[in-house]
Amino acid sequence: MGDDYRLRGRLWIEGPEGTFLGYGRVVLLERIREHGSISAAARSMEMSYRHAWDLVDSMNRQSREPVVEKTTGGRGGGGAGLTAAGERAVACFWSAHRDFRAFLERRSRRMEL
Protein backbone atom coordinates (compact mmCIF):
# COMPACT_ATOMS: atom_id res chain seq x y z
CA MET A 1 0.00 0.00 0.00
CA GLY A 2 2.87 2.41 0.80
CA ASP A 3 4.16 2.19 -2.80
CA ASP A 4 1.01 3.97 -3.97
CA TYR A 5 1.89 7.10 -2.00
CA ARG A 6 4.75 9.54 -2.09
CA LEU A 7 5.57 12.81 -0.43
CA ARG A 8 5.54 15.98 -2.47
CA GLY A 9 6.50 19.46 -1.51
CA ARG A 10 7.70 22.82 -2.64
CA LEU A 11 10.78 24.59 -1.44
CA TRP A 12 11.34 28.29 -1.14
CA ILE A 13 13.66 30.53 0.83
CA GLU A 14 11.96 33.07 3.08
CA GLY A 15 13.40 36.54 3.45
CA PRO A 16 12.52 39.65 5.44
CA GLU A 17 9.53 40.39 3.16
CA GLY A 18 8.30 36.83 2.63
CA THR A 19 9.41 34.77 -0.33
CA PHE A 20 12.97 35.57 -1.35
CA LEU A 21 13.62 32.66 -3.73
CA GLY A 22 11.48 29.88 -5.09
CA TYR A 23 11.45 27.81 -8.25
CA GLY A 24 9.87 30.51 -10.45
CA ARG A 25 12.14 33.27 -9.20
CA VAL A 26 15.23 31.12 -9.76
CA VAL A 27 14.11 30.32 -13.30
CA LEU A 28 13.63 34.07 -13.87
CA LEU A 29 17.18 34.73 -12.65
CA GLU A 30 18.52 32.01 -14.95
CA ARG A 31 16.62 33.50 -17.90
CA ILE A 32 18.01 36.96 -17.10
CA ARG A 33 21.49 35.41 -17.17
CA GLU A 34 20.68 33.68 -20.47
CA HIS A 35 19.03 36.62 -22.26
CA GLY A 36 20.85 39.57 -20.70
CA SER A 37 17.65 41.48 -20.02
CA ILE A 38 14.65 41.41 -17.70
CA SER A 39 12.30 42.09 -20.60
CA ALA A 40 13.57 39.17 -22.72
CA ALA A 41 13.59 36.89 -19.67
CA ALA A 42 9.97 37.83 -18.93
CA ARG A 43 8.91 37.20 -22.53
CA SER A 44 10.58 33.78 -22.49
CA MET A 45 8.47 32.88 -19.45
CA GLU A 46 5.27 34.44 -20.84
CA MET A 47 5.32 36.88 -17.93
CA SER A 48 4.71 40.60 -18.03
CA TYR A 49 7.73 42.86 -17.71
CA ARG A 50 6.04 44.53 -14.73
CA HIS A 51 5.67 41.24 -12.86
CA ALA A 52 9.27 40.25 -13.63
CA TRP A 53 10.51 43.65 -12.50
CA ASP A 54 8.49 43.40 -9.26
CA LEU A 55 10.06 39.99 -8.53
CA VAL A 56 13.57 41.28 -9.26
CA ASP A 57 12.95 44.36 -7.13
CA SER A 58 11.71 42.20 -4.24
CA MET A 59 14.78 39.95 -4.43
CA ASN A 60 17.15 42.93 -4.66
CA ARG A 61 15.53 44.64 -1.66
CA GLN A 62 15.72 41.51 0.49
CA SER A 63 19.29 40.59 -0.39
CA ARG A 64 22.33 42.09 1.33
CA GLU A 65 23.65 42.80 -2.17
CA PRO A 66 21.59 43.13 -5.37
CA VAL A 67 21.07 39.83 -7.20
CA VAL A 68 20.35 41.54 -10.55
CA GLU A 69 22.08 44.61 -11.88
CA LYS A 70 20.63 46.72 -14.67
CA THR A 71 22.84 48.45 -17.19
CA THR A 72 21.74 51.67 -18.80
CA GLY A 73 21.22 51.86 -22.51
CA GLY A 74 23.59 53.00 -25.12
CA ARG A 75 23.63 52.16 -28.77
CA GLY A 76 22.46 48.62 -28.14
CA GLY A 77 20.07 49.54 -25.33
CA GLY A 78 20.24 48.55 -21.70
CA GLY A 79 20.27 45.15 -20.18
CA ALA A 80 20.54 43.23 -16.96
CA GLY A 81 22.63 40.45 -15.53
CA LEU A 82 23.17 38.46 -12.40
CA THR A 83 25.63 39.75 -9.86
CA ALA A 84 27.94 37.47 -7.88
CA ALA A 85 25.26 37.52 -5.15
CA GLY A 86 22.68 36.44 -7.74
CA GLU A 87 24.86 33.56 -8.89
CA ARG A 88 25.33 32.47 -5.26
CA ALA A 89 21.59 32.66 -4.62
CA VAL A 90 20.82 30.46 -7.65
CA ALA A 91 23.47 27.92 -6.64
CA CYS A 92 22.24 27.90 -3.03
CA PHE A 93 18.64 27.30 -4.11
CA TRP A 94 19.50 24.40 -6.43
CA SER A 95 21.70 22.80 -3.78
CA ALA A 96 18.90 23.01 -1.21
CA HIS A 97 16.41 21.79 -3.84
CA ARG A 98 18.49 18.66 -4.54
CA ASP A 99 18.70 17.91 -0.81
CA PHE A 100 14.97 18.50 -0.40
CA ARG A 101 14.09 16.17 -3.30
CA ALA A 102 16.39 13.47 -1.89
CA PHE A 103 14.71 13.80 1.51
CA LEU A 104 11.25 13.43 -0.04
CA GLU A 105 12.34 10.32 -1.93
CA ARG A 106 13.93 8.71 1.14
CA ARG A 107 10.99 9.49 3.38
CA SER A 108 8.45 8.33 0.78
CA ARG A 109 10.08 4.89 0.72
CA ARG A 110 9.53 4.55 4.46
CA MET A 111 5.82 5.46 4.51
CA GLU A 112 3.44 2.81 5.72
CA LEU A 113 -0.18 3.75 5.15
Image: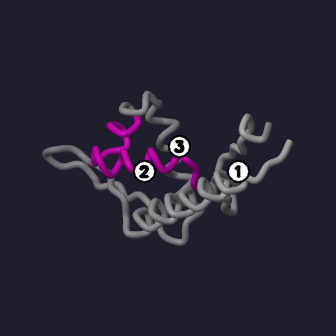
Q: CA distance from mark 2 to mark 1?
A: 33 Å
Tell which circle, 3 or 1, labels the residue nearer the N-terminal end: 3
Local SS, label 2: helix
> Among all residues in the image, which is located at the extreme right?
113
Of 101 and 86, which appears nearest the observer?
101
- Give me the residue at 32% from left, 52% from top: 33
Dot 1 amino acid type = Arg
Relative image position of residue 63 (x, y in whole percent): 55, 66
How many marks overall? 3
Give the Cα distance between marks 2 and 3. Answer: 9 Å
Q: Is residue 88 left or right of residue 106?
A: left
Foreground mark, 3 or 1, reads: 1
Q: Is residue 79 above or below residue 61?
A: above
Residue 72 percent coordinates (x, y):
28, 53
Q: Position of residue 103 (x, y in %)?
A: 66, 58
Question: Mark 3 or mark 2, which is nearer the start of the sequence?
Answer: 3
Label 3 environment density (alpha carbons within 10 Å; few <14, some 14–19, many ≥20): few
**Res. 21 image quadrant:** bottom right
- What residue did someone put label 1 on? 109
x%, y% of residue 58? 57, 53
Q: Residue at x 37, y 65 (%)?
A: 83
Label 3 vs label 1: CA separation? 28 Å
Residue 24, which numbered label? 3
Q: Amino acid at mark 3?
A: Gly
The image shows residue 70, relative to residue 2, as above or below, that is below
Q: Mark 2 sits on what residue?
A: 29
* Picture quadrant of residue 88: bottom left
Query: Which residue is more in the foreground, 85 or 53?
Result: 85
- Give the amino acid type for the residue marked by disc 2 in the picture: Leu
Asked if 84 appears above or below 79 in the picture, the reply is: below
Q: Which residues, given as a range, are shown in magenta?
A: 21-42
